[in-house]
Image: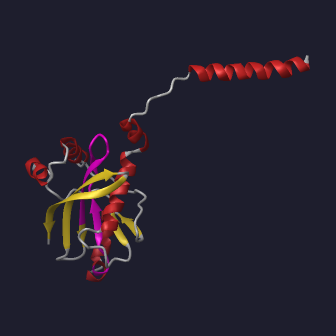
Amino acid sequence: MKTVLRIVVPSICALLIFACAASVQPVEMTEDVKNQTFLSRDVEAAAIYSVLLNKDPGNYLSDSSTLIIVNETYLGAETDDEVYFKSTDSFLEDETLVDFRSINEQKEEINSLLSVNKPYEYMSPAELILHLDEGQDWISTHTVTSFSKVGFNNKLDQALVYMGHFCGRDCASGSVYFLVRENHVWKIRNIIFSWVS
């Protein structure tokens, strides 16, 4: 009886495996499905923040040994001029601009793990106020960076984001950046000037 079971059980298992394998239909993975499978808004937003901090387009961060990032999103740019935004880059899709506006209607905490070439620290607005109350010495050695939430198109290959810097009384700026993802890498396509002091 044991010999029969040793032969029959593996044979039945093999038949079941082959039967199940024959009934499985391959799923066609279109390029859009492949991209969406591996992308998420949070991961892509962290990648975009990292690119902007590493590129430092305004050269505000070169003297900072530690990057100070406000841990709450902030939109310091006027974003309701659709004609202006569209005139700066015709490649900018309407859905990217609409998402950027709608996602930034409310503030949100940022605590993304970033990939930057300097140490960084998140600070709340309350902590920043305490440091600023310490006087000019603290702000003269630190540049504070703030970000908006990132607006994307549906394919997550276009993005709009605001980044601002504060480094003292007469040292501040903010810009809206238009980025595109090419070959899985985010690149700044256009800088939409916002303000400087």
Drawn side of residue 27 relative to residue 53, left or right: right
Q: Position of residue 108 (x, y in %)?
A: 31, 52
Can residue 187 be seen here? The reply is yes
- Residue at the location (78% across, 23% down)? 10
Query: In the figure, 41 relative to 128: above or below?
Result: above
Query: In the figure, 126 relative to 23: above or below?
Result: below
- Residue at the location (18% across, 42% down)? 94
Q: Position of residue 15 (x, y in %)?
A: 70, 19
Q: Position of residue 45 (x, y in %)?
A: 34, 52
- Residue at the location (32% across, 45% down)? 156
Query: In terms of depth relative to the viewer, which is nearer, 2 or 183?
Result: 183
Q: Position of residue 180 (x, y in %)?
A: 28, 52
Drawn side of residue 17 relative to residue 191, left or right: right
Drawn side of residue 80 relative to residue 40, left or right: left
Residue 149 painted magenta: yes
Query: In terms of depth relative to the viewer, which is nearer, 26 or 6?
Result: 26
Residue at the outermost bottom position: 137
Give the magenta range: 140-164
Q: Quadrant of the C terminus?
A: bottom left
